[in-house]
Image: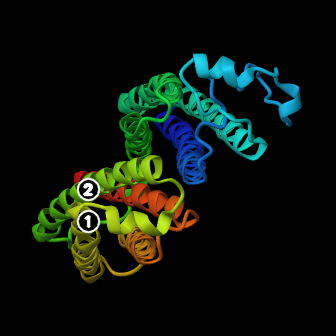
């Protein structure tokens, strides 16, 4: 096989891998949204056991299908307040089915990466690592159920999902290096790179504070019940720091996008990626303000969590793409 034929074959494999990797990443984000919706609706313990649901692989549709003493059975297991609710049960069950589908997609992604190990072994390493992380995430999900939704376990489960996203994005970015080769970033000055690191640090700090706020909201939900309008006034000082700090993050990213736009123009892929990231940040700020000022409406919580997760992913991809573009 000639060098040209090898290049053509590698290009086709890379294109196929990028497609499935992007689909998988979008699916993981969809699962994050579904998981956040399950949590916001209070359906997290809709299935009090794992991997089965009320002892069956397919959950019941009515309480009549359960033993008369099922509440006593689950009380003996540490779930004293278990009460069958078909909506919550099937919501959590569909969340689990979505998780299984993600596992299959990541398995396909890892399989698609194997022919690329000679082109770039890091694509294969990252894809296989993501598969192993998903297996661990499945086990961690069982521990979340066993802990009766302890906030710390839920946070760890969420952070693991972001780690999986980051690993898949790393593999995708490695597979995009050839795409960036045709787009020079020579016009971008060193100030952009320094500011990019500042923006990444600000985002990590904001996400860390948001994690603390979310754990506190879980605590208030457990101690004060469903009276959401009272939660905001009971939140500690770091909630108000988190809310105010969102303006700092927003304006820092506006300046980052301006630096790219001024250097590369509107049609460069890095500029478009940064503008998409800025749009998501605006969504996060608006949804956060809605939560803070309108009494924590349940429908807005998943949107806020998803937008925060997307910011992390888009900034990470922007950083990786910029690094690869500079290497060309």
Quarter of the image for residue 165 reads top left
Q: Residue at x 55, y 48 (%)?
A: 39
Residue 41 or residue 94, whichever sits in front: 41
Vertical placement of 259 versus 43: above or below?
Answer: below
Whole-percent x, y for residue 60 in the image = 83, 31
Q: Residue at x 11, y 70 (%)?
A: 191
Element type where label 1 sits in the image: helix
Whole-percent x, y for residue 15 in the image = 56, 46
Residue 125 located left or right of residue 27: left
Vertical placement of 97 versus 200: above or below?
Answer: above
Whole-percent x, y for residue 167 in the image = 39, 38
Mark found first going from the N terminus, 1 or 2: 2
Q: Are marks 1 and 2 in contact (CB under 8 Å)?
A: yes
Quarter of the image for residue 280 reads bottom left
Residue at which label 2 appears: 209
Vertical placement of 113 versus 30: above or below?
Answer: above
Residue at which label 1 appears: 242
Q: Residue at x 58, y 28 (%)?
A: 80
Q: Residues within 10 Å of mark 2 (few under 14, many from 20)?
A: some
Residue 220 or residue 60, whichever sits in front: 220
Residue 146 located left or right of residue 250: right
Residue 190 located left or right of residue 33: left
């Amino acid at each position: 096989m000639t060098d040209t034929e090898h290049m053509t074959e590698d290009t086709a494999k890379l294109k196929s891998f990028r497609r499935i990797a992007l689909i998988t990443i979008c699916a993981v984000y969809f699962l994050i949204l579904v998981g956040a919706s399950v949590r916001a609706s209070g359906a997290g313990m809709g299935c009090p056991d794992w991997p089965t649901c009320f002892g069956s692989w397919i959950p019941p549709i009515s309480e009549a299908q359960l033993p008369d003493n099922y509440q006593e059975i689950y009380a003996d297991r540490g779930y004293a307040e278990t009460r069958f609710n078909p909506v919550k049960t099937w919501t959590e069950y569909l969340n689990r089915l979505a998780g299984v589908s993600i596992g299959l997609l990541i398995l396909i992604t890892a399989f698609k990466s194997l022919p690329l190990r000679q082109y770039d072994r890091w694509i294969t390493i990252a894809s296989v690592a993501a598969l192993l992380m998903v297996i661990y995430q499945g086990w961690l999900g069982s521990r979340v159920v066993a802990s009766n939704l302890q906030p710390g376990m839920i946070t760890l489960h969420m952070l693991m999902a972001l780690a999986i996203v980051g690993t898949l994005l790393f593999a995708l970015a490695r597979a995009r290096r050839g795409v960036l080769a045709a787009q020079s970033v020579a016009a971008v000055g060193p100030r952009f790179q320094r500011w990019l690191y500042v923006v990444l640090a600000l985002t990590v700090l904001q996400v860390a504070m948001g994690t603390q706020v979310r754990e506190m909201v879980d605590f208030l939900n457990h101690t004060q019940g469903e009276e959401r309008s009272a939660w905001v006034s009971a939140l500690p000082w770091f909630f108000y720091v988190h809310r105010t700090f969102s303006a700092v993050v927003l304006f820092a990213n506006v300046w980052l996008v301006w630096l790219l736009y001024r250097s590369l123009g509107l049609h460069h892929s890095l500029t478009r990626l940064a503008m998409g990231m800025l749009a998501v940040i605006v969504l996060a700020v608006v949804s956060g303000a809605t939560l803070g000022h309108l009494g924590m409406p349940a429908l807005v919580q998943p949107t806020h969590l998803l937008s925060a997760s997307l910011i992390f992913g888009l900034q990470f991809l922007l950083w990786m793409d910029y690094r690869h573009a500079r290497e060309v």
